[in-house]
Image (cartoon, rainbow, N blue to C red):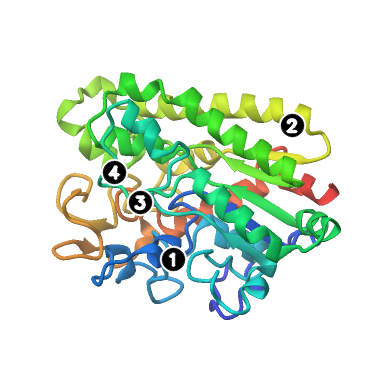
Amino acid sequence: MLFIAPSSPNTYFAVLASPCKRLNSIISFGDSLADTGNLLHLSTSNIPPHFAVPPYGETYFHTPTGRFSNGRLIIDFLAQYLEVPLVAPYIGSKYHRSSANIFSSGVNFAVAGATAMDNKFFEQRGVNMTKVQNFPLGTQLGWFKEVLPSLCHTASGCEELFKRSVIFMGEIGGNDYNHALLAGASKELVQTFVPNVVGRIASAVTELLELGAKSIVVPGDLPIGCSAALLTHYMSNSSQQDYDPKTGCLTWLNQFAENHNKLLQTELKRIQERHPQAKIIYADYYNAVMPLYLSPVKLGFSNGALRACCGGTGVYHYNSNVECGKAPATACPNPSFYVNWDGLHLTEATYKFIFQRLIKGPFMIPPFKTLCTV
């Protein structure tokens, strides 16, 4: 499929035309998989954060935008598919004189590093979150409620807003596990988080439905056992039996993600039964991306799926003390041949692969086109 300049995104998916002409707004929550610039605008340091310098953004935007990738994210591909402008980050846009106009085609509250649970939850369980600047799901929902009156001034206006909007709930929840595991929490402890995390996502979905939402897409967790960061973290404490021989990923971590996804789907089905007037879609990120870990070279990712394009030294080209964008980190010359971007995030080519499988394949349950009939 042909890449085009960012100044003309509306024709990018000309071959993959959207059947949902009524949807012309995206309201997003989540973490770095969906953040289009919020954490960058929240930064108070005089020194640019590592994700605000090249090679971040090099592939499509040709400059860093606050996205944690070399280019577009799934939310960007969704916007181009729906033929609407790329979704503006809430922070940095909210004080703009014409913010209501900026947000007329959607608004993004996702913040890199965000968790579903608030910091108190982790503190009560002895997990050190002091190194993480966290803007959890509850904070993001608060921002949405704060800006909602400027998006729709009347009850009928809000009804119309929700009728033409798809709410993109994440991905969210992955950092609840990643932060804790990388901070040294035991896998037995972190496994106990799953019902709480899924419950928090479910309560946020319910809250949005009660506000009037009509169309909600809720992504599941990625196969975290294939993350270069977690593979590096557990490398010295893992035996050969811990790895999937087909992918090289850590089996127990992927089973962890699958458990999260199974519980999440159960909750979404329960909520859907209680709110038949709306459409709730589960986006199966896990199975959509899995072919890249099983057969990366066959699918055009000739440099494999587990080694990061940009990072430090080591088996997986990842070092938690050597951030992509900062010396002495190095970057590969062609990110499109890599699945993994910086150890924790994926390349634009990978996000494109996931999105196309979500839209065209059986990885949205029910299919995305069902939103067209709400």
The amino acid marked with disc number 2 is Gln
The amino acid marked with disc number 1 is Gly
Give the foreground label among 2 and 4: 2
Which of the marked residues, 4 or 3, is nearer the chain's N terminus?
A: 4
Q: Residue at x 54, y 73 (%)?
A: 95
* Marks 2 and 4, how far apart at CA: 35 Å
Rendered view: 108 above or below 210:
below
Which of the marked residues, 1 or 2, is nearer the chain's N terminus?
A: 1
Rendered view: 209 above or below 308:
above
Q: Are marks 4 and 3 in contact (CB under 8 Å)?
A: yes
Kindly identify which numbered label has been placed on residue 268. Answer: none
Residue 150 % position (x, y): 69, 66
Circle 2 sits on which residue? 272
* Marks 1 and 4, how far apart at CA: 19 Å
Mark 2 surroundings within 10 Å by alpha-carbon count, few (fewer than 14), some (14 through 19), many (20 or more): some
- The residue nearer to you, when weighing 367 against 107, is 107
Residue 100 % position (x, y): 66, 71
Circle 1 sits on which residue? 71
Left or right: residue 80 compared with residue 342: right
Residue 241 % position (x, y): 26, 20
Which of the marked residues, 1 or 4, is nearer the chain's N terminus?
A: 1
Circle 4 sits on which residue? 228
Q: Residue at x 60, y 33 (%)?
A: 202
Left or right: residue 232 compared with residue 347: left
* Marks 3 and 1, how far apart at CA: 13 Å
